[in-house]
């Protein structure tokens, strides 16, 4: 019996092997399809297909109108002795109050008081909150829509030439901008802006810069304004601004509450090329690194910032992209 079976197998051996191979093929394809489904396996996919599915977490934004704008003009020549030029551009009539040698501790206490007790709407409220812990005070009126360059200088009689050894208990200059009109304070969410300006003196030569800018809201919060780091093409006219070279434009970002102000003109925006395609205007800000270097198209291909390789936790557009 066994002999007959073996002879039969021998006679039909080519057919037998073909059948065995065919069955193996069916089992293997069944397993492969069961594992991956009808999709193409990941390793065989085009890399472009996988990257386009990258979806960055988009930050919820709220647009607010900021009536204040303050910058330091020609910071290279500013110092405690020679004064500082402040560049102002306000949407309403404002009061500019300069506090020279303002106490660091009292200033931060004043910000906390703004949150918990009283809102800093006027210079008087701010001075009460500071408990008059400053060395000299100056006040100017700023007219609505005036692009003003105000040179602020300590008078001779103040006799303030240096602020002692580092670390210091006083900021060289704190600038408070408040709305002059009573009715304007009702319209705007942002009621005042505090800018802390560093000025070099004989003791401490670090060049002049704005250390912090806080926007104070009518509801009692305050926000720390941060700069965006923008990529810009070399022909862009705005590169001459800040000395750091990192930022081409003083676009400010309100990170903490997801508030953003959009002040720059869109025409200026279009001169800035996306660093990847070099073709379209940059529009996307990455957090936490604040690099602004990609257009609406290229942003879908990145999960890490192409400038610093940091992982992008959140992102938001400068202008809402048109569909
Ligand atoms: Zn691009
Ligand atoms: Zn970055």
Image: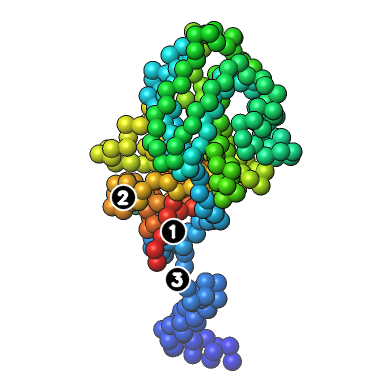
Q: Secondary structure at mark 3?
A: loop
Which percent across, then down, holds residue 138? Answer: 54, 22
Q: Is the residue at mark 3 in contact range of ligand 1, meaning its CB lies under 8 Å from it?
A: no
Image quadrant in which the C terminus is located: bottom left
Q: Secondary structure at mark 2?
A: helix
Image quadrant in which the N terminus is located: bottom right
View extreme (right): residue:
117
Tag 3 or tag 2, which sits nearer the N-term?
A: 3
Which percent across, then down, holds residue 87? Answer: 41, 31
Crowdedness of circle 3 by 10 Å Cα count: few (<14), some, many (20+)? Answer: few
Residue under the image location 45 percent in, 71 percent down: 40
Q: Which residue is mark 2?
A: 267
Residue under the image location 43 percent in, 14 percent down: 82
Would you say 231 lies left or right of 107 here?
Answer: left
The Cα–Cα distance between marks 2 and 3, rounded to whole angstroms, is 45 Å
Q: Which mark is residue 320?
A: 1
Would you say 82 lies left or right of 188 here?
Answer: left
Q: Is residue 165 visible?
A: yes
Q: Which residue is mark 3?
A: 40
Which percent across, then down, holds residue 99? Answer: 57, 22
Which percent across, then down, holds residue 152? Answer: 46, 21
The answer to which quarter of the image holds residue 194 is: top right
The Cα–Cα distance between marks 2 and 1, rounded to whole angstroms, is 15 Å
């Amino acid at each position: 019996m066994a002999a007959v079976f073996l002879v039969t197998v021998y006679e039909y051996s080519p057919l037998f092997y073909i059948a065995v191979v065919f069955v193996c093929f069916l089992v293997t394809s069944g397993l492969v399809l069961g594992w991956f489904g009808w999709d193409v396996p990941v390793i065989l996919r085009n890399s472009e297909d996988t990257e386009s599915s990258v979806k960055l977490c988009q930050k919820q934004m709220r647009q607010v109108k900021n009536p204040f704008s303050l910058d330091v003009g020609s910071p290279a020549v500013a110092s405690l002795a020679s004064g500082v030029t402040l560049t102002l551009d306000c949407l309403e009539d404002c009061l500019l109050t300069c506090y020279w040698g303002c106490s660091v501790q009292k200033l931060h206490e004043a910000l906390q008081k703004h949150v918990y007790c009283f809102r800093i709407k006027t210079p008087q409220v701010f001075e009460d909150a500071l408990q008059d812990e400053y060395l000299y005070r100056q006040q100017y009126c700023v007219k609505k829509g005036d692009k003003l360059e105000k040179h602020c200088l300590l008078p001779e009689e103040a006799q303030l030439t240096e602020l002692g050894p580092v670390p210091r208990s006083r900021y060289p200059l704190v600038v408070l901008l408040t709305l002059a009109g009573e009715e304007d304070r009702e319209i705007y969410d942002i009621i005042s802006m505090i800018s802390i300006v560093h000025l070099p003196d004989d003791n401490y030569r670090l060049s002049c810069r704005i250390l912090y800018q806080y926007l104070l809201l009518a509801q009692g919060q305050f926000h720390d304004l941060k700069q965006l780091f923008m990529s810009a093409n070399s022909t862009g006219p705005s590169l001459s601004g800040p000395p750091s070279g990192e930022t081409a434009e003083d676009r400010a970002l309100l990170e903490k509450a997801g508030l953003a102000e959009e002040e720059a003109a869109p025409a200026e925006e279009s001169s800035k090329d996306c660093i990847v395609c070099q073709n379209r205007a940059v529009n996307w800000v990455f957090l936490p690194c604040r690099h602004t270097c990609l257009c609406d198209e290229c942003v879908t291909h990145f999960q890490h910032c192409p400038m610093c390789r940091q992982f992008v936790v959140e992102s938001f557009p400068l202008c809402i992209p048109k569909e």
